[in-house]
Image (spheres, rainbow, N blue to C red):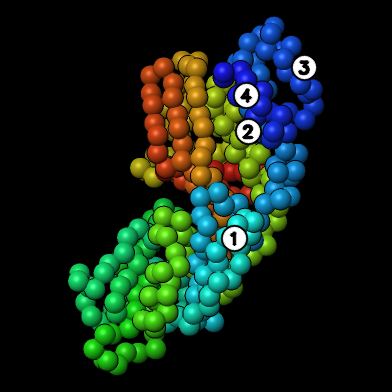
Amino acid sequence: MLAKALFLSVMALGAITSLQSYDVLTDYRLHGIENIQKKMDKELAKKSYWIKYLKTQDTTFGYLEKYSNVLACNKSKATLKLYIKNSKGRFYNKNKHHAYTGKNKGDKQTEGDLRTPVGIYNIVSKKNQRNLDPFYGPLAFVTSYPNLYDKYRGKDGHGIWIHGFPLNNEKRNKYTKGCIALKNSNLQCLEREIKIKDTILIIAEHQVKKNISKAKLATILADLYAWRYAWIYNDIERYLSFYSRDFKRADGTTYKFFERYKRRIFRKKEKKTIIFKDLNVIPYPNTKNIYQITFYEIYKSDTFRFNGNKELLIRLTNNKMKIFLEK
């Protein structure tokens, strides 16, 4: 059954374009399923595969497998736009709302600086009227600020929400302390139109980047799977080549200690299974060549198992992915 599933996947996806079905079957007959799997893993690390695959994908905001709703906030224009993926997999602008943002311009740095942060955020929860101060309206969406990249840059503060206007007709200023504020009717409309787990919030000082280069995305995705290939097949030098020397892990581990740890692990030559699901690659707002990569990782080896969310911050340098932050 496994052999049949792999064979059908190859034919359906066109992952091994250089092999005919006869070659795949012969390879399986002589060498077993693992040999075919290794070849498929290698093909996924080729830019040519991703160039072909991305031709039919909507890359308006990047490469998005997990998210079907994008909230794009332009601080300078005081707007929050909702984009929804339709049945054909294409994002369209469903709504545009006037949005109040922080009193002061620029990216948020510290608690109380009256700035709305610039970045990529999840909506982690929703506060309803019963557990919310009436000043913030009928409900509020709580964002994931500060995110991994914010913490890496030493930014602090908390409580960045998308909320409404006072319920008791209390007057309010035409700015916030750092949150995004919508008229209550618009906020309630937004609540009806999105599912929290399917929504990503992108906040930019000006217009959110759109129509992302498929060639750049193909380069990143191919490198991501080349990184995975080196990881699975214990090629430590190739694996480490994808890391920047200023790399830091979320727990504070620097490149020097990370390299030492990985070399010790790779020497075990363990057989590994590594699968990426719900993969997203988004250019980071107000940067030139920095991208956020997130995915759900399924990892299994003889001594360790992990199922959970993974996040990478990478620079695209000289047409190559360099990981500088990982969680």
Amino acid on which the number 3 mark rests in the picture: Asp
Cα separation, mark 2 vs mark 4, equals: 20 Å
- Which label sits in the foreground, 2 or 4? 4
Q: Residues within 10 Å of mark 3 (few under 14, many from 20)?
A: few
Q: Nearer the viewer, residue 201 or 318?
A: 201
- Residue carrying label 1: 86
**Residue drawn at (75%, 43%) of the image:** 52
Marks 1 & 2, CB-CB < 8 Å contact: no
Marks 3 & 2, CB-CB < 8 Å contact: no
- Which label sits in the foreground, 1 or 3? 1
- Residue carrying label 2: 226
Dot 1 or dot 2: first in sequence order is 1
- The numbered mark at residue 42 is none
Above/below status of 287 relative to 99: above
Q: Nearer the viewer, residue 139 or 110?
A: 139
- Residue carrying label 3: 23
Quarter containing the N terminus: top right
